[in-house]
């Protein structure tokens, strides 16, 4: 495990908190790589240079899980531990072995602990990701002549349901209004929640306005600093997937919400530890809010808008969907929205463009062939 006591010698444009966060993820990846067979070393380098840190971590987890399966559930490998699996044993794997692993074992397996057994069920989307990780691994090993054949063409297809626009979970415009009213007035909160709300309502409002205006990812919002914002220029800086640095324009409502929080509610700088002094959103303990605490905050206020339980409130990602569909409903082009939300593919943005039931209703309502008698 990485040491908690380290100093960042940062000569990049990234703030220290992002450098530290990335370092923690890198350490997790290195820990996984240390458990895997050495003949995969060049594959680790390939992942390091071609995918985001979170994707690299996910790929390594999937490969490690597959290797453990080879040892515990098959006779393909005689290794006593994952790192001792040989390249020759890997070369003996056939497409049917992988199909059996994906289609049978991964679909449902048990994790046995001392006092309980956990039943793990994976839907097709999770199975498709595990398959994708193995396709990448086997193709790489074949390309680098570590295994003698490319078996990936024999992998069974996994059918994924086509995304249905009407199934997209998001807040409607009137529900956003209810949510923002709740954070301003405390309506819908329990007595215990209201005690905290009195101390954090400006912070909470700023968080919700940022999410619903820009469709920020949870990670992007949680990493924001005071120094991320240049109010004179009317912009702020975020760091997206794969280390992309992006300047975002500020509008008046967002700027007001942020300044109200910073000037009226956020603790004074001299009362905050050096580590968290630059963090924009602080917890009651005057530390940078964790991703979990931001998630709970969003679920709480969205549950009020949806009139449901706290557990059934929406995640920050649903507010990202809310921003996308709301912008399109207000008439912005899908390409502008794609750029704002950093969608890799415009087809993702098109899903939100299709989600315009009210527009379809208005078209039909105002297009009558027969006059009323």
Image (spheres, rainbow, N blue to C red):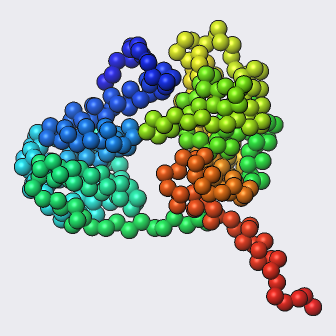
Q: Residue at x 58, y 48 (%)?
A: 339
**Quick one: quadrant of the N terminus?**
top left
Q: Is residue 370 above or below residue 214?
A: below
Q: Left or right? Give the position of 95 relative to 237.
A: left
Q: Position of residue 5 (x, y in %)?
A: 39, 13
Q: Left or right? Give the position of 108 relative to 152.
A: right
Q: Residue furthest top?
A: 270
Q: Position of residue 136 (x, y in %)?
A: 27, 52
Q: Nearer the viewer, residue 204 or 338?
A: 338
Q: Position of residue 194 (x, y in %)?
A: 74, 32
Q: Is residue 8 above or below residue 180?
A: above
Q: Residue at x 65, y 26 (%)?
A: 229
**Quick one: quadrant of the C terminus?**
bottom right
Q: Is residue 291 above or below residue 9?
A: below
Q: Residue at x 34, y 18 (%)?
A: 3
Q: Residue at x 76, y 74 (%)?
A: 363
Residue 101 seen in this snapshot: yes
Q: Is residue 5 above or below residue 44?
A: above
Q: Left or right? Give the position of 211 relative to 29.
A: right
Residue 17 seen in this snapshot: no
| Count of numbered circles in the view | 0
Q: Nearer the viewer, residue 50 or 183?
A: 50
Q: Residue furthest front?
A: 233
Quadrant assignment, res 330:
bottom right
Quadrant assignment, res 268:
top right
């Amino acid at each position: 495990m990485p040491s908690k006591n380290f100093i960042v010698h940062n000569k990049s444009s990234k703030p220290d908190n992002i450098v530290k966060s990335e370092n923690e993820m890198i350490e997790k990846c290195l820990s996984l790589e240390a458990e895997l067979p050495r003949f995969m070393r060049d594959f680790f380098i390939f992942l390091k240079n071609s995918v985001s840190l979170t994707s690299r971590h996910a790929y390594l987890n999937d490969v490690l899980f597959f290797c453990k399966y080879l040892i515990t559930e098959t006779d393909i490998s005689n290794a006593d531990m994952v790192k001792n699996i040989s390249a020759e044993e890997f070369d003996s794997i056939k497409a049917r072995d992988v199909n059996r692993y994906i289609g049978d074992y991964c679909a449902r397996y048990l994790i046995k602990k001392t006092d309980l057994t956990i039943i793990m069920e994976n839907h097709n989307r999770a199975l498709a990701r595990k398959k994708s990780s193995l396709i990448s691994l086997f193709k790489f090993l074949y390309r680098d002549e570590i295994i003698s054949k490319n078996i990936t063409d024999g992998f069974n297809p996994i059918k994924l349901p086509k995304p249905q626009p009407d199934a997209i979970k998001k807040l409607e415009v009137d529900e956003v209004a209810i949510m923002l009213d709740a954070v301003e007035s405390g309506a819908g909160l329990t007595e215990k929640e209201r005690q905290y709300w009195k101390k954090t309502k400006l912070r909470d409002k700023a968080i919700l306005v940022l999410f619903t205006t820009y469709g920020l990812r949870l990670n992007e919002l949680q990493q924001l600093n005071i120094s991320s914002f240049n109010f004179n220029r009317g912009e702020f800086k975020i760091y997206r997937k794969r280390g992309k640095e992006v300047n975002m324009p500020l509008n008046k409502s967002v700027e007001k919400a942020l300044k109200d929080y910073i000037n009226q509610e956020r603790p004074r700088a001299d009362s905050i530890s050096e580590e968290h002094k630059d963090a924009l959103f602080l917890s009651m303990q005057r530390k940078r809010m964790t991703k979990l605490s931001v998630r709970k905050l969003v679920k709480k206020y969205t549950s009020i808008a949806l009139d449901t339980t706290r557990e059934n409130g929406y995640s920050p990602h649903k507010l990202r969907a809310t921003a996308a569909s709301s912008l399109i409903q207000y008439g912005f082009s899908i390409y502008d929205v794609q750029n704002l939300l950093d969608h890799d593919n415009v087809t993702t943005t098109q899903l939100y463009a299709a989600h315009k039931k009210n527009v379809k209703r208005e078209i039909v309502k105002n297009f009558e062939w027969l006059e009323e008698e």
